[in-house]
Image (cartoon, rainbow, N blue to C red):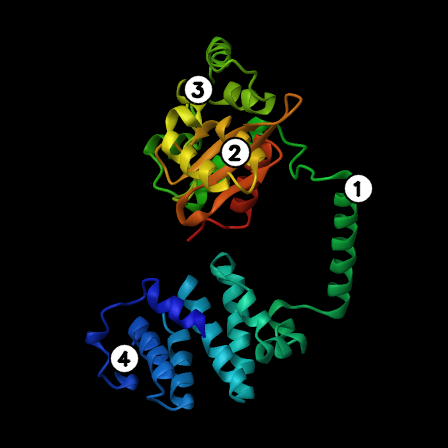
Amino acid sequence: MRIGVDFIHHGVTHNTDEFINKPIDKLEGHQLFAKALIAFYKNTESLATILNALDRFLHSSDAVGHSFFYASTVASLIAARNGFNEKADKFIGLWGQGYLKYWNNYSLSYLMRDRSTAQLLLQGKLAPVFKLTEEICQKESLEIIKRLSERLLKGRSLAYNNLSLQEILKQISLRAIEQKTFDFSKEAIELKWLGRQPALELEIQKTEKRLATNLPEDYKDFLRVTNGFECISIISPKLAVIEKVDFLVNVDSQLVEIWTDTMNDIDNLYNKKFRNSIIIGGHEEEQQILLVPLDKNEWECWSFMAGGGCGETKYPSFRYYLEEQLQRLEDGFYAD
C-alpha cells in the first residue's frame, strides 16, 4: 500500500523513537496515525485495532488536508481488502466528507484503481455524501458531453471572456487577499490590489526593441494595467516588471542547457521554443512564467517548473494563464 509509505516519508513524523514502543491506545494525533501504519506493515496489531486507531485519528483535530486524505484512503483500502464491509462503507463516507473540505489535497486515483474500493464506489456509496441523484448525474453528464462536443468543434475557449483584463486582475487581487493565500503587504491589503502602476508605452516599446520582437497583445494589455503583479500564493510566481523581462537563456542559461540537452533526442521543436522563450515572471523562483513564440506571430504561455522534472504546463496565451489563477481562487485551491 504505497500511499501509507508516502505519508510516512513526506513529513508526518520521522522520529519514531518517541512513540514506537508505546501502546497504540495511548497515542494521539500524527503519532497515532504513524503507529497504525507501522503496525499494519509489520503486522504487530490486529486489523480491528488498526482500523479503530485510524478511525480515532480521523475524528481528531490533527486530521486535516493531506493527513485526512491519507488516513481515510488507507483506512478504506484496509477495510475493503480485508472484508470489513461496514467499516469500509464508513471510511469511504469519511473520505467523501474530507473531499468536500480538502479537495485540493486529494488524489482520487487511489480508491478508484483498487478493485476492492472501486466496487464500493460503483455501488454509489458516495452518492449520499455528495448529494447525488440519478437525475443530477444524467443532467450533468449531458452538460459535460455538450461542453466537450463544443470544445472539439471550436477548441479551447476563455472562461471569463466577458471580463476585461483589468477586471480579472482586480478579482484575483480581491479573492487572494480575502482568502489570505499569501503574506500580503499592508499596502496591498489596504488597496485590495496586488498590482503596480501601469507600464508606460515607451517602456513597452523599449523592451520590444531590446528583445527585437513584438510581444503578444494580451501581455502588453496586462502591462498597460500593471507593471508586474505580486505572488497570489506560496506556489505562484511573481510577475516581473517590464525592465526585468528578458530571454530565459539570458537569465538562466544553465536551466536552458540542462532542459534542452534532456529533450534533444525527444523533441527538437521543444528545444527551439524553450531557447527562444521570454521570462516574464518567477525570476529566481521555483516556477517561471514564460512567453513562448510560435509561428505567424503567435505565442504560448508556459508555467514552467524544473524541480522534480515537472516541466511545463502550456496555455494558449498569457490570458489563459491569468484566467486559471482566477478559477483556482474561486475554487479555493490556494486556501488553507
Instruction: Give the SS element for disc 3.
Output: helix
Q: Is residue 64 visible?
A: no
- Label 2 or label 1, whichever lies nearer to me, is 2
Q: Is residue 331 visible?
A: yes
Q: Would residue 86 be found to the left or right of residue 176 on screen?
A: right
Query: Decide: marks 3, 4 in contact (CB < 8 A)?
Result: no
- The residue beneath circle 1 is 153
Residue 255 x %, y %: 39, 35
- Label 4 or label 2, whichever lies nearer to me, is 2
Crowding near the residue tagged with mark 1, few <14, some 14–19, many ≥20 C-alpha atoms within 10 Å: few
Residue at the image position 62 percent from the left and 34 percent from the top? 316
The answer for how far apart the CA atoms under marks 3 and 2 are is 25 Å
- The residue beneath circle 4 is 27
Count of marks, rendered view: 4
Residue at the image position 50 percent from the left and 50 percent from the top? 333
Q: Tag 3 or tag 1, which sits nearer the N-term?
A: 1
The answer for how far apart the CA atoms under marks 4 and 2 are is 54 Å
Q: Tag 2 or tag 4, which sits nearer the N-term?
A: 4
For the N terminus, which image quadrant? bottom left
Instruction: Give the SS element for disc 4.
Output: loop
